Image: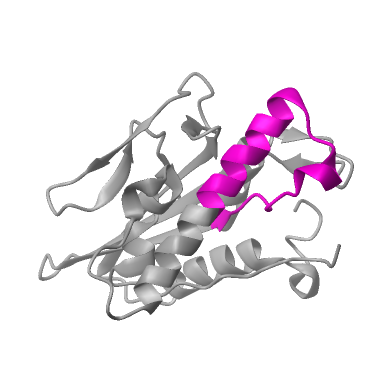
């Protein structure tokens, strides 16, 4: 990411999103105050691991008073500029699990979740608004016979495929208007993303794939 942040033509999705958020805030009225927090964690071997504090290796998913799921104990950093957001991302990326397989020299062994939490307060009437943006990097589905995975890498692949299947099942159930039960609790990934997938939210999925 470093080296393309300043070149808008070469920026990826995340730098564009972050810059757009701050440009929008900078253009708002002066009576509006903003507080922006970010968190960064990964789901590795079905355990939630904080990428900003590697001592936190098995975080749990809880619900707030409005029954909205959140990762309890995840490190939160206040940020005030796009540059500070990018610094947090680079710090977290350095702590992600990767491995070498027959098909990918830098294969992601986890799903990573970068959360941007924005709170707005009107200083004149004290009206408050809040919003969350989940940026999720899903590890790719793997065919074990192609990747040559063994031992721990094989176990990682099994967990990756299992959680991706759970995500697919949730999306399928949501698309079927007749389903009364949505299996959010089948994986930590779908539990964390419950609000984004089925709540008052918009979800965009970008797929990078190649033919085997």
Q: Is residue 161 left or right of residue 113?
A: right
Asked whether residue 150 is drawn in magenta, I would say yes
Q: Residue at x 54, y 23 (%)?
A: 54
Q: Residue furthest top?
A: 55
- Residue 97 in sight here: no
Q: Residue furthest bottom?
A: 177
| Image coords of residue 154 (percent x, y) | 71, 32
| Image coords of residue 14 (percent x, y) | 62, 62
Q: Residue at x 73, y 23 (%)?
A: 151
Q: Residue at x 49, y 18 (%)?
A: 55
| Image coords of residue 130 (percent x, y) | 27, 63
- Residue 44 in sight here: yes
Q: Is residue 72 left or right of residue 46?
A: left
Q: Residue at x 74, y 67 (%)?
A: 11
Q: Is residue 58 above or below residue 40?
A: above
Which picture quadrant has residue 91? top right
Which picture quadrant has residue 160? top right
Asked whether residue 147 is drawn in magenta, I would say yes
Q: Is residue 13 above or below residue 102?
A: below
Q: Residue furthest front?
A: 145
Q: Which quadrant of the rendered structure holds the C terminus? A: bottom right
Q: Is residue 64 above or below residue 30?
A: above
Which picture quadrant has residue 152? top right
The chief SS type of the magenta part is: helix
Of residue 52 and residue 169, the one placed in the foreground of this image is: 169
Number of numbered discs on residues: 0
What are the residue bounds of the magenta stretch? 136-164
| Image coords of residue 153 (percent x, y) | 72, 30
Of residue 128 and residue 195, the one placed in the foreground of this image is: 195
């Amino acid at each position: 990411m470093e080296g393309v942040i300043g070149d808008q033509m070469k920026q990826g999705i995340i730098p564009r999103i972050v810059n757009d958020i701050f440009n929008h805030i900078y253009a708002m009225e002066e009576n509006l105050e903003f507080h922006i927090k970010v968190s960064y964690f990964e789901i590795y071997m079905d355990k939630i691991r904080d990428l900003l504090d590697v001592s936190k290796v098995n975080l749990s998913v809880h619900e707030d008073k409005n029954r909205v799921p959140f990762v309890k104990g995840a490190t939160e950093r206040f940020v005030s500029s796009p540059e500070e957001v990018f610094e947090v991302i680079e710090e977290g990326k350095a702590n992600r699990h990767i491995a070498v397989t027959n098909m990918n020299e830098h294969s992601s062994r986890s799903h990573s979740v970068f959360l941007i939490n924005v709170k707005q307060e009107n200083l004149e009437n004290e009206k408050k608004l809040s919003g969350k943006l989940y940026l999720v990097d899903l590890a790719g589905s793997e065919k074990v016979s192609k990747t040559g995975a063994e031992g721990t890498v094989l176990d990682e692949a099994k967990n990756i495929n299992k959680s991706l299947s759970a995500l697919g099942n949730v999306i399928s159930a949501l698309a079927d208007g007749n389903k009364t039960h949505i299996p959010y609790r089948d994986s930590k990934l779908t539990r964390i993303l419950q609000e984004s997938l089925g709540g008052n939210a918009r979800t965009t999925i970008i797929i990078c794939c190649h033919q085997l």
